[in-house]
Image (spheres, grey):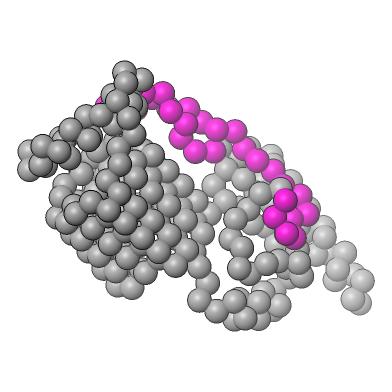
Amino acid sequence: MMLARELPVEIAWELALHEAWCTERGGRCASFKGADLRGQTFRGEYLRFADFSEAKLRGADFRNADLQTTSFKNADMHGADLRGANLLFADLRSADLRHADLRNAGLQCAILRDANLAGANIDGADLEGAEIQYKDSEELMESMDKKARYFVDRRGGCIAVRDRNNTDPDYFGLHQDTRGVIRFWCGTQRKEKCPTCGHLSLDGWQLASDDADAAYRLCTELNAKVNNSET
């Protein structure tokens, strides 16, 4: 674990407990809920599953930190530096990310509903499968009406063929019971060992290329049937 020299003792201790928890040597998952961490440095830290909800994180440095499945719900992250951070499945609901630096961050399947991204730099960020709140559901439905009826929805390690005529614009998740799903395929979870602490953990989902090909074939066939019935 990389403990920055400028971290206060109480924060360093919380990170030490988190490292012990990650390596199954006791400790507990780090909780910084509601804490004032403005300008603090967490660069390169392993902080999977940690809780930063409602924390004050203005100008905080999370460059290259592992923040997979970490909660930043309702956190003030105005101007935070998240370049290269792993935010896979992170909970960023209602987070204030104005002017945050998210260049090259991994935001696959992150939850960004109601997050404020005004002025944020997302160049090179991977947003595949991220849940982003649409500001105008009617506008979304109008744009959907102009497209083919069936479409492929791919989110990280899962993929589905969906029916635009039976889609809920206010729900952004994807699973086999999601409204409008014709067929759903799910990949397998990868496992990796953390190079810092050696803890074996899950690292996202990997979709088989054959399943992806099958989804696109089915989508093409369904749309062809619709077109033939209309002629």
Which residue is painted at 51% across and 31% down in the image?
Answer: 190
Which picture quadrant has residue 122? bottom left
Which residue is painted at 72% across and 51% down in the image?
Answer: 177
Q: Is residue 165 magenta?
A: no
Q: In this view, does 18 lie above or below 214?
A: above
Residue 183 is situated, as x and y percent measured from the top left of the image, at 76, 49
Instruction: Give the residue at the far left of this rendering.
Output: 6
Quadrant in which the C terminus appears: bottom right
Residue 217 is situated, as x and y percent measured from the top left of the image, at 76, 52
Instruction: Give the residue at the far front of this rendering.
Output: 34
Q: Is residue 148 above or below residue 109?
A: below
Most common SS among magenta residues: strand
User: Residue 82 versus residue 170: which sits nearer the camera?
Assistant: 170
Q: In this view, does 92 lie to the left or right of 43?
A: right
Which picture quadrant has residue 149? bottom right
Which picture quadrant has residue 172? bottom right
Quadrant in which the N terminus appears: top left
Is residue 66 among what the camera can see?
A: no
Q: Is residue 41 above or below residue 173?
A: above
Residue 160 is situated, as x and y percent measured from the top left of the image, at 69, 51
Q: Is residue 181 magenta?
A: yes
Instruction: Give the residue at the far top of this rendering.
Output: 25
Residue 227 is situated, as x and y percent measured from the top left of the image, at 85, 71
Which residue is painted at 55% across and 33% down in the image?
Answer: 189
Which residue is painted at 34% across and 34% down in the image?
Answer: 29
